[in-house]
Amino acid sequence: MNNLKAIKRENTTSGQINKLRSEGLIPAIIYGGKDSNTKISIEKKSIKNILNSDSFLSTVVELEIEGKIQKALPREIAYHVVSDEPIHIDFMRIVPGTKIIIEVPVQFKNQADSPGLKRGGVLNIVRRKVELKCPAENIPDDIIIDLAGLDIGTSIKISSVKLPDNVVPTITGRDFVIATVAAPTVVKEPEKPTAAEGEVVEGAEGESAPEGAEAAAGKEGDASKKDEKGKDQGGDKKPVAEKKPAEKK
């Protein structure tokens, strides 16, 4: 569990808050339970490592305020629109006996021991986080899924995941899928055609005319020959003698 030193603060004006940020502190507030809301500030360098983790908003932290330890859960982080630096954090007190709805990240282990992945299969992650309903004092940091022994075609459902006592998914009534080991997908590039021996490659020197052009040229030649033949026949043609009818005897 992460232990963070927090400084109680009374400043509320924007100028005072900006001064805290310039000194490397992040303004924050802790709320919930019977105690009143408490304004605090935390050193940025002390929280930077866990702040950037995927599980920060589901990680219980211990806030040390004036010598007293309070367990809390980060619920919201505000970031600067330009620098993307954290400028405010909301913490919720952990009150024993209450239940919390929280999104917990999914982690996978033993990929090297999965026969399906060894044979080129793909781990298809359907849900990277699962929403759970947990006792405040028993919040898991993550959900661990063991891939050892899983072959291609395996669907990993929530029923196959071992959850802590009294921790249940908020989705009820169906055994939803978290991930699958899918068959490999290989896309083959079409093979480029290779020129056979003696075949003319398009664009090469001495290329013969395209088939369409040859056909067109052939038609033009035939038409020209017909035209010339017609002219010759028309010019040399002799008139045919008119046939007289036979005389009656």
Image: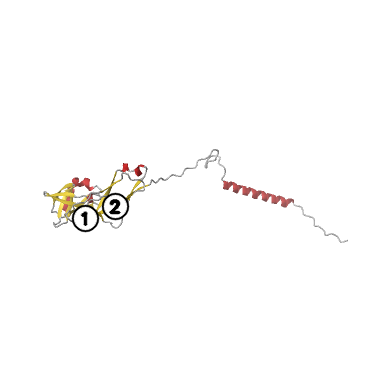
Q: Which numbered circle lies on residue 100?
A: 1
Point out residue 39 in the picture as x, y percentages from the top left corner: 15, 54
Rendering coords of residue 175 (x, y %): 31, 54
Closer to the camera in the image, 121 or 57: 121
Q: How is the image coloured?
A: secondary structure
**From the viewer's perspective, is 201 left or right of 185?**
right
Circle 1: element type: strand
Mark 1 surroundings: few (<14), some (14-19) or many (≥20) residues within 10 A: some
- Residue located 27% across and 52% down the image: 130
Of the two numbered discs 2 and 1 on the same chain, state the one appearing first in sequence. 1
- With 64 as the anchor, is 226 left or right in this view? right
Q: Secondary structure at mark 2?
A: helix
Identify the residue at the far bottom of this view.
Answer: 248
The answer to which of 247 and 115 lies nearer the viewer is 115
Which residue is outermost to the right?
Answer: 249
Whether residue 237 is situated above or below residue 247 in the rendered picture: above
* Amino acid on which the number 1 mark rests in the picture: Ile
Residue at the image point whose x is 22% and y is 45% from the top: 49
Separation of disc 2 and disc 1 at Cα? 21 Å
In this rendering, the label closer to the viewer, 2 or 1: 2
| Residue projecting furthest to the left | 67
The C terminus appears in which quarter of the rendering? bottom right
Mark 2 surroundings: few (<14), some (14-19) or many (≥20) residues within 10 A? few
Identity of the amino acid at label 2?
A: Ser
Taking the image as shown, residue 189 lies to the left or right of residue 17, namely right
> Do the CB atoms of the residues marked 2 and 1 lie less than 8 Å apart?
no
**x and y, in percent, of residue 208 in the image:** 57, 42
Q: Position of residue 63 (x, y in %)?
A: 15, 49
> Which residue is identified by label 2?
159
Q: Which mark is residue 245?
A: none
